[in-house]
Image (cartoon, rainbow, N blue to C red):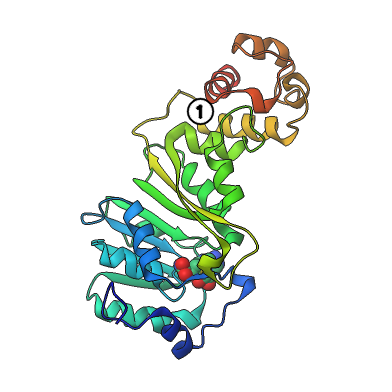
């Protein structure tokens, strides 16, 4: 018995199923069920929601999400060794846990879930940023998810919530903050994980806004921001010159100084430029 449910403690699960952590799969497990329950609570009231969890591993966060009352959890795990451990959880929560063995980058979760949908994950570091960018950049808004509760390396979490003028401010901050509220809600030291990674981690909570903060075409904004931060030390007139022959005039028309650098430009400025170039 573990405290949050009647299933065995996670160390025992790992020993029973031979789940030695594999670096190639970004495996750093959370074995403290009080901690995984706390992360699940950050995701908000789960009782009426389906939850997509990427990379459940031995199932610590999965158990936290189910114990917090999630209507259904869809757990997508690439490592086949974890599936029998997850099936034991499914038996303890009849009809509420669906397990898919596969690559999160390749499955379409909408085929299995009913809105409202929330996403929660202690993400594998190797695919975490790519998944986040996909979730943040659908062509239409609002997206299929209401909130994202995601563990990242601390440095990535800081890039998501960064404000203009800081070194961490860049493409991730603009994409995240344009159409969602993004906050760091928990910090975790390396020792919280088994094995302990080299760096600290943090949980970021992103809540989808009903509509973007400022109007802009998503594809144009993405291109402008990627190009601007690709050469972040250059002045905008040089960094963006490939986007339009008269880029200096366009920058001025958008209310920006051609001599400013990308990291000084607030979200509103990038959106104005995207509208000007769109
Ligand atoms: N959620 C567990 C926990 O908190 O203890 C495990 C987290 S561990 C950081 C990341 C998990 O993602 C591992 O179980 C790993 O096998 C899985 N994983 C890695 N790449 C994946 C992918 N492309 N699709 C689905 N799962 C993946």
What element does badge 1 sit on? loop
Residue at the (40%, 84%) spot, across then down = 84
Residue 155, horizontal then vertical, whole percent: 61, 48
Residue 69, horizontal then vertical, whole percent: 23, 62
Q: Quadrant of the N terminus?
A: bottom left
Q: Nearer the viewer, residue 196 or 215?
A: 196
Q: Is residue 94 left or right of residue 88?
A: left
Can residue 55 be seen at all in this image of the molecule? Answer: no
Residue 107, horizontal then vertical, whole percent: 46, 62
Residue 223 position by quadrant: top right
Count up the numbered dots: 1
Residue 94 position by quadrant: bottom left
Figure check: 27 above or below 1: above
Figure check: 152 above or below 197: above
Q: Nearer the viewer, residue 72 or 18?
A: 18
Q: Is residue 128 left or right of residue 60?
A: right
Can residue 68 be seen at all in this image of the molecule? Answer: yes
Q: Which residue is mark 1?
A: 217
Decide if ligand 1 comes within 8 Å of the CB at mark 1.
no
Residue at the (42%, 71%) spot, across then down = 32
Residue 112 position by quadrant: bottom left
Q: Residue furthest bottom?
A: 16
Residue at the (49%, 25%) spot, across then down = 216
Residue at the (33%, 66%) spot, across then down = 64
Figure check: 5 above or below 130: below
Q: Nearer the viewer, residue 233 or 38?
A: 38
Residue 268, horizontal then vertical, whole percent: 52, 21
Please rate how many residues cluster around mark 1, counting C-alpha atoms within 10 Å: few if below 14, some from 14 to 19, many from 20. Answer: some
Q: Quadrant of the C terminus?
A: top right
């Amino acid at each position: 018995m573990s405290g949050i449910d009647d299933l065995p403690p996670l160390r025992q699960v790992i020993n029973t199923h031979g789940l030695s952590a594999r670096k190639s799969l970004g495996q750093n497990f959370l074995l403290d069920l009080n901690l995984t329950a706390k992360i699940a609570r950050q995701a908000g009231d789960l009782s009426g929601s389906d939850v997509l969890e990427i990379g459940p591993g031995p199932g610590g966060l999965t158990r936290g999400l189910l114990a917090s009352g999630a209507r259904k959890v869809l757990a997508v795990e690439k490592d086949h060794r974890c599936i029998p451990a997850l099936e034991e959880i499914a038996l303890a929560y009849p009809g509420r846990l669906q397990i898919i063995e596969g690559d999160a980058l390749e499955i379409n979760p909408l085929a299995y879930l009913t809105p409202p949908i929330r996403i929660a994950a202690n993400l594998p570091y190797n695919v975490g940023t790519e998944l986040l960018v996909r979730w943040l950049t659908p062509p239409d808004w609002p997206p299929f998810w209401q909130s994202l509760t995601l563990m990242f390396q601390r440095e990535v979490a800081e890039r998501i919530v960064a404000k203009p003028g800081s070194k961490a401010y860049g493409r991730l901050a603009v994409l995240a903050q344009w159409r969602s509220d993004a906050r760091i809600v928990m910090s975790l030291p390396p020792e919280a994980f088994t094995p302990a990674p080299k760096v600290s981690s943090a949980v970021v909570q992103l809540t989808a806004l009903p509509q973007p903060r400022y109007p802009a075409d998503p594809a144009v904004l993405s291109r402008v921001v990627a190009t601007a931060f690709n050469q972040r030390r250059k002045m905008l007139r040089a960094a963006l010159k490939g986007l339009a022959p008269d880029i200096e005039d366009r920058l001025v028309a958008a209310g920006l100084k051609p001599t400013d650098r990308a990291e000084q430009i607030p979200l509103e400025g990038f959106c104005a430029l995207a509208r000007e170039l769109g």
